[in-house]
Structure formats: C-alpha cells, structure tokens
Amino acid sequence: MLTKIKASIIGRPLKTEQLQEEKLPVWKALPILSSDALSSVAYGTEQILGVLVVAGAFALWYSLPISLAIVGLLTLLIISYRLIIDEYPGGGGAYIVSMDNLGWFAGSVAGASLLVDYILTVAVSVTAGTAAITSAFPVLHDHRVAISCGFVFIIMILNLRGLRESGTIFSVPTYLFIISIVMLVIVGTFKVVFAGKGGSPPTITSHFPEGLTWFILLRAFSSGCSALTGIEAISNATPTFRAPERINAGRTLVILGALLAMLFGGISVLAYLYHMTPLPEETLISQIAEETFGRTIPYFFIQATTALILILAANTSYSGFPLLASIMAKDKMMPRMFTARGDRLNYSNGIMVLSFAAMLLISLFQGHTERLIPLYAIGVFTSFTLAQSGMVQRLLKHKPHGWKGKLAISLTGAIVTFIVLLIFAITKFTEGAWIIIVILPIFVFVFSKIYRHYEAVADELRIDISTVKPQIKKQMIVLPVGGINQVVSNTIAYARSLNVDIVALYIAFDENDAKRMRDRWKVWCPDIRLIIMHSRYRSIIRPLLKFIGKLPNYVGDRQVTVLIPQFIPRRWWHRLLHNKTALVIRWILLTRKDIVVSTVPFHLKK
C-alpha cells in the first residue's frame, strides 16, 4: 500500500538505463538552472538604489555606472565559468576547482559555502514569493510560514518526480517572466524616448560627505551584485544536461548571461529614466510596471510572473545541492547516503535534506525575507572567489593555449568578487552575516571529521588477501524466548539445523511465572537447556544484557550468537498493534563487540 501511495506521488520507479532520458535539453535546463539568477532581476536594481538614496536623490545617477560595472563582472564570471565547464564537465563547480587546485581546505570551504547558499536560496526565494502573495492578500500574512513551507514541500515533490517532469512544469513560469520583463523594458523605453513619459528630474536633497562617497558606491555595488547569485548553478550541474553535456551547459550559460545582462540592465535604465526611488510598501518592479502600463492587465501579468519566478528560483538549488552533495559524498566529505539515486533516478536524499533544512530556516526566521537576506550571497561570493582563484592556479600551472587572456579574466574576477565578499561581510555583519561566518567553519570541521572517519574505517577494513584467511570458530547460540509458541518453535528448528550448542533464556517477572515456564519447557523441549532470570522491575533488556555480559567467562573462545525470534504481521497496520521488543533487543545488542545478532522471522498468514 505504501508503495502504491509513493508511486502515485512521485511516479513509478525508473530503470537505470532510463537515466539518459531524465537528462535535460537546453530549453528545459535554462528555466531549471537559471531561475535563481533571473529572479534577481526583480530586486537587483532595487538593492542598488536602496543604498544610493541615503546620499540624496542626486546620487541615483550612479546606479547606471554601477549597473554597467555589475554587467561587466557578470561577463567576466560567465566567461570564467565557461572555462570551468570545459575543464570540469563532471560538475561540482567551485568545489571541484578549489579541491583540485587549492587543496582540501579551500575545497571544503567552497563546498560549505555552496551548500549553505543553496539552502538560503530556497528560503529567501520562497519567502520573497510568499511576501508578494501576502501583500496582495494581507489576511494571509500571519500564515506566511505555513505557506512558505507548503511551497517548499510542493517543489520537493515535483523534484522527487524527476528532472524531466519538473523541468516541463517550471519552464512555463520562467519563460513568461522573461517575456514580461522584456515587454516592460521595450514598452517602457519606447514611452520615455518617444512619448516623453517619465518622472520629474531628481532634486538634490542632501550633500553626502565626500570622504564616504566611495564607501557608499562600493556598498551599492556589492548590494547590486546580489543579481549575480545563481549563475554558478549551471557549471555545478553540468552532468544533468543531455549529451554533449559540456557543449549544452556552455550554451545555456551564455544564454543566461545575455538574458541577465539585458533584463537587469534594462530595469536599471528604466528606473533611472523614470527617476524611481525604493518604497517600503511597493517593489521597484511594481513601480516601473505601474508607471508604464498603469493598473491594467499587463501590470498584473508582470506582478504574477515576478511572484512565480521568485518562488521557482528555489528550484535552482534542487539541481545544485543534491549533485554537489553526491560529489562531496564520493570524496568522503559527506554521508554516503547522498550518493544513492532514488526511484526516479535523482538524488532523493539530497532533495529531502535541502527541503527540510530550508523549512527549518524559514520557521526559525518566521518567514521574514528581510531577516534572511543578510545571510544571503556571502556563501556564493565565497565560492566565486575560490573558483576564480582555483582557475588562476590551474592556468599558471598548465598554461594552455591562450592562457594569458584567460588568466586576466580569472584574476580580475577573483579580485573583484573578493572585494565584494569583504564589503558584504563588513556591511552586513551585524545584520546577520556573522551567522554565516560562524557556520562555515563548523561545516568545514564536520567535513573533516566525516573524512577522517571514512579513512579510518577503510584502513581498519582493509586486508591482505595473501595472508588473512577466514577462521572457523565454535558457536554457541543464546535464544531469548517469551513463551512457547510457533515463533519460538520456528527459531529452535533453525538453531538445531546449525548443529551447535543452544541455550534458551527466559525472563520471569515472578516465581509463579518462572515455575510455570520451567514445567512446560521440560515437557516440550527437554534437550535444550533453559535458563530463567528474574526481573523484579519487569525489565527484559537489563537481565538479558547482564546474562550476556557473563557469558565470556563460560564459553571461552566460542562465538556467541543471539537468535531473536520475531513474527512478521501480514499487513502494515498490524505492526502498529504489537510492541517492538525484538527490534529493541536487536538494536541494543548490535552495539556489543563480542556477539553476533540474528533474527529468525516467522511470517503470519492472517
């Protein structure tokens, strides 16, 4: 029954041979892997203006050169990540580049940064989309946490169904958003240039001290760089593309760069031409759309697609996080469970961990986007810096054809992204960025402990097949019994077939119980020794452990095996009606080094 329910929710299991069918063509990969980056168009320019406006309306002009500089940095990053795709088509992005060229520590920092950023991307995107909905319907404001978690759950289910199905579903809203913003930029520019539409020129309201001008400009630049988050997702998820993966991933990255530059630049130009300033009660996109179309159908279409893209931006993480976690797990830095593919040939464990981590974050921050944003982007710019630095090291080492030009691009990108990272860390520290600065070292420490554990296990399990041979040991079986019944009879029959010494153990709660069991056993199975232990506190586990603890004094070098009788109900709900004593005993005994534990099942027919 549970299998049927699971199949109805996430679909029928797929064969391993169908993995190629689940890989993405460019037209599906673009909306899945680019929704995070494209959604930044909705708030990138607004972040710039929000910093500049404190210096007075005259400073808003600087949004244009700042936006141009961000587009320039975008171009550098696109070219650099295109190089990464060529060099590392197996995916992993900044993690693989850092691990391969800068060493274990840099790789672990890059991996931790990306994993944290993926979780934050889901939380920030979904809460931002929910905020757009609750702004339109204020009655839902108090339910924002439940709504946000509900959206995360829906996205999780869609991704558990597989990349191909989720790509089909998510592609429509993403392409509609692209169309809506292109329409807004074209129509808005036309009305300003040819119809003379636009706001009144800004007036100078204050003079900002000249000594702090550069700090304000750098802060505005770093805030606007939030528009660059998400562009690393394509290189991280290169293996999810259809063959040829490297070429298709590169094409998708270039398309994303062109779209992002056009949409972000267009919104920045329109915001200046309309002389827009950020308002606490209305987004910049809403202001521009209303100025261009009024409260008409195109306006509401733009608002709807913006809300959708903000929510679906979370989906980018569902391609990156599980794949990166699987790569890190193969490198012994994360639990092995992340390497397993689910029924639909996706990394289902990574998908679920990402979802529940995002839900926890949303709950802890009560669904407030503004509380989550200071945590956002530090992780991704850390990975940007490490990725560019890793490519610099690689280019200097191997010096491939045209390496000097590539080196200039990667080196410039590394320096600029490092500067942005520092500005983010300083200006956002007291607003919550300190949390990420504290969490990243913890992640790195955990990675190191996991790696050392796997290495220690491998060393302990490794054998020399020329000298180490399996040894035969004499056996003694201990059989815990709760009475005389079919389950116990089935277990004794199995134990006898092994032709070893058998001891039955019964835990009695009072003298009458002990006498009754002793008398019945003599009649039923006199050839097997029965040991009765008394438990005045009605505990089964403590007397059993006490008995097993004394066995080494009596059995010598014989191997002790505890055979646990257990009946298996026919229907799943029958299991809820019985205690789990056998499972508890098995779980506790497995922690002991000196015994073997085995279960003998008896399947009920009714």
Image (spheres, rainbow, N blue to C red):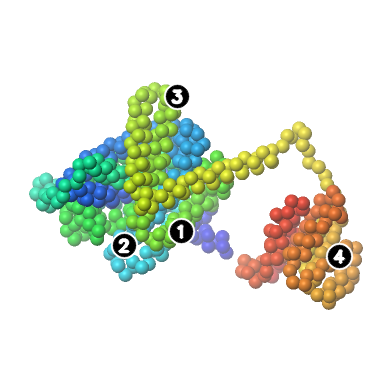
Residue 397 percent across, percent down from the top left: 45, 24
Q: Earlier in the sequence, mark 4 or mark 1?
A: 1
> Which residue lies at the image location 89% right of the left edge and 69% below the top edge?
522
Marks 3 and 2 sit apart, C-alpha to C-alpha, by 52 Å
The mark found on residue 360 in the picture is: 1
Q: Which of marks 3 and 2 is nearer the N terminus?
A: 2
Residue 250 percent across, percent down from the top left: 38, 36
Q: Nearer the viewer, residue 379 or 430?
A: 430
Marks 2 and 4 sit apart, C-alpha to C-alpha, by 70 Å
Q: Which of 15 and 392 is in front in this view?
A: 392
The mark found on residue 398 in the picture is: 3
Marks 1 and 2 sit apart, C-alpha to C-alpha, by 21 Å
Determine the secondary structure under disc 1. Answer: helix
Q: Comparing marks 3 and 2, which lies closer to the viewer? A: 3
Q: Comparing marks 1 and 2, which lies closer to the viewer? A: 1
In this image, 21 relative to 223: left or right?
right
Q: Which of marks 2 and 4 is nearer the N terminus?
A: 2
Q: Which of marks 3 and 4 is nearer the N terminus?
A: 3
Q: Which of marks 1 and 2 is nearer the N terminus?
A: 2
Q: Are marks 1 and 2 in contact (CB under 8 Å)?
A: no
Determine the secondary structure under disc 3. Answer: helix
What amino acid does circle 1 point to? Leu
Q: Residues within 10 Å of mark 3 (few under 14, many from 20)?
A: few
What amino acid does circle 3 point to? His
On the image, numbered disc 4 is attached to which residue?
530
The mark found on residue 133 in the picture is: 2
Q: In which quarter of the image is the C terminus?
A: bottom right
